[in-house]
Amino acid sequence: MALAIEDYGIIGDTHTVALVGRDGSVDWLCLPAFDSDACFAALLGDESNGRWKIAPVEPVTAVERRYRGDTLVLESYFNTSTGRVRITDLMPIREQAPTVIRVVEGLSGHVDMRMDLTLRFGFGQTIPWVRRVDSLIHAIAGPDGIALWTPVETKGVGLSTVAEFTVGLGEKVPFTLSWFPSNDLPGHPVAPDYAIEDTVHYWREWVSACSFEGDWRDAVTRSLITLKALTYAPTGGIVAAATTSLPETIGGERNWDYRYCWLRDATLTLGAFMRSGFHEEALAWRDWLLRAVAGDPTKLQIMYGAGGERRLAEWEADWLSGYEGSTPVRVGNAASCQFQLDVYGEVISTLYEAAMVGDPPTTASWSLQRMLLHFLDKSWLEPDEGIWEVRGPRRHFTHSKVMAWVAFDRAVRMAGKLRLEGPIERWKKTRTAVRREVLSEGFNKDKGAFTQYYGSDTLDASLLMIPLVGFLPATDKRMISTIEAIERELMPDGFVLRYDAERSVAIDGLHGREGAFLACSFWMADCLALAGRGRDARELFERLLELRNDLGMLSEEYDPVLGRLVGNFPQAFSHVSLVNSAFNLSGQTGGPGHLPGVLHRTPRGELRGQKHRHSASRFRL
């Protein structure tokens, strides 16, 4: 059985990510890219589905883990009755072949070690042909090849490659694993010591651009490193998570493939990177966005592959037993074909944010935005599947309409500030119409709150975005009552649920409960601060930070019943929201983010919301 989600750390090369367990086992790795087939899939099955474990033979009495400073070089310390060893895991920033390097080093005494390498291509299904060429192990099946270099003697046991060795004080034993196309030859291995030094230098140099200086700097820095690790360097796209089918409820069916790029992540991600000083990453994401959505606006998808791929057909890997029995294991995502109004608002808002930091739209990108707005001018009246990608019937979701308002609002602002041509008066008229309808149909007077969809009395955490995008101030009495209603009904354990899943089968088409959605809980902290409840906001934020694992990482959700992380891991949406909330609660601007207000400290140390203007003159690249 795989470990608890919080027992994993990650290493990555900005093309893909490996999950390394507290027990020394790499249980998940897709090569050569995030959305490739996995060659280690024990995370979603068992060791027979592929893993790479290096660990002491004797019982381990204690395990400590840490990253080497602000890097993605992972160090794991194992204590036994005979000694202490350190395993250093990393993926060098890719120049040619994707590579995983593992170095075992003796720190005291002597420790007997064992390596078990079980390669299974095709998500744990395909057993490769393995052969030895001098000190090199070759494993080949279909289009995939893996090469393993190590100075220790290996042997085949069953359908795995194993090695047993002993390390003493000061001794080092390296292992280098590289992927290559099976029709080619493997490249030359990288010297492990050089790779470690070079990788540490890369991450430290990258982090040095971070402009965040407020409270919680360590948490912000680790989240930014995680977001960078989830960035696909060739295109600038950012995947939602490194995994597929980690369940939102243990044993449940809410298991999705998140190894793709969601457009709704764009606004938050760009804001987080821009605020933190990483303009290059933000603009690369903006450029990826323009390439991905180019074409017929009626064909806009909510997500794309890391390279901009549009066909993300969903299928089930029925030979995998699922994480702790949570099935089905899904590859691909059928939600890519859904109609979701909010993505239009997120796309236009993202491009607006980029323009406000001195990167105005090109003729082509402005033409694209006008096309999107022309389509939205008619389609905003239609029902959709909404932000949570429900698999029930389409409805008039309140959040979707609010984000349609955002699209027209940002277009009007951008055109006015940059003197761009367009039907601005028409956009203003539509903006007014959308706002009027949301205030009339989206607010339930009997409930005293905005509700999930028109005519319902169901609450939804996406309604917390209303003040965060500037539709209404958090101090508006309708918003205050909505925040309080969500606190009463969607925070049974102190963290925010997206909605009442157990009572929403008719809405989302799925059965069972789910954990608290972490991004929504960060939104609540932002709303509390903007509503003048700074102390409550900080307390919630601190509780959220306590949910991170020992390496500072978050998954999609937290199950308060089981007291553990659930959902895909690590989750970009959670870490982006952490970064933005830290900026907001620290009173830093840094650049335009998802909030319409800046939070600052009063003489008594509390936090209050204060509006500010986004102007190109305030921010410099």
Image: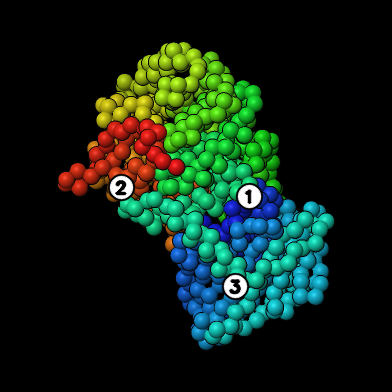
Find residue 67 and name its label: none
Query: Which corner quadrant of the image does residue 518 belong to?
Result: top left
Left or right: 37, with 252 as reference point: right
| Sooner in the amino-acid sequence: mark 3 or mark 2 | 3
Q: Position of residue 172 (x, y in %)?
A: 60, 79
Residue drawn at (49%, 78%) of the image: 79
Image point 69% across, 57% down: which residue?
96
Q: Which residue is mark 3?
A: 193
Q: Nearer the viewer, mark 2 or mark 1?
A: 2
Observer able to see residue 580:
yes
SS class of the residue under badge 1? Answer: loop
Left of 15 or right of it: where is 559?
Answer: left
**Label 3: element kind:** helix
> Disc 2 and disc 1: Cα gap in Å?
34 Å
Q: Which amino acid type is marked by label 1?
A: Phe
> Is residue 244 visible in the rendered structure shown here?
no
Tag 2 residue = 586
Classify residue 463 as left or right of residue 93: left
Which of discs 3 and 1 lies nearer the camera? The answer is 3
Mark 1 highlights which residue?
Answer: 34
Q: Nearer the viewer, mark 3 or mark 2?
A: 3
Quadrant of image for the N terminus:
bottom right
User: How many numbered marks appear?
Assistant: 3
Q: Amino acid at mark 3?
A: Asp
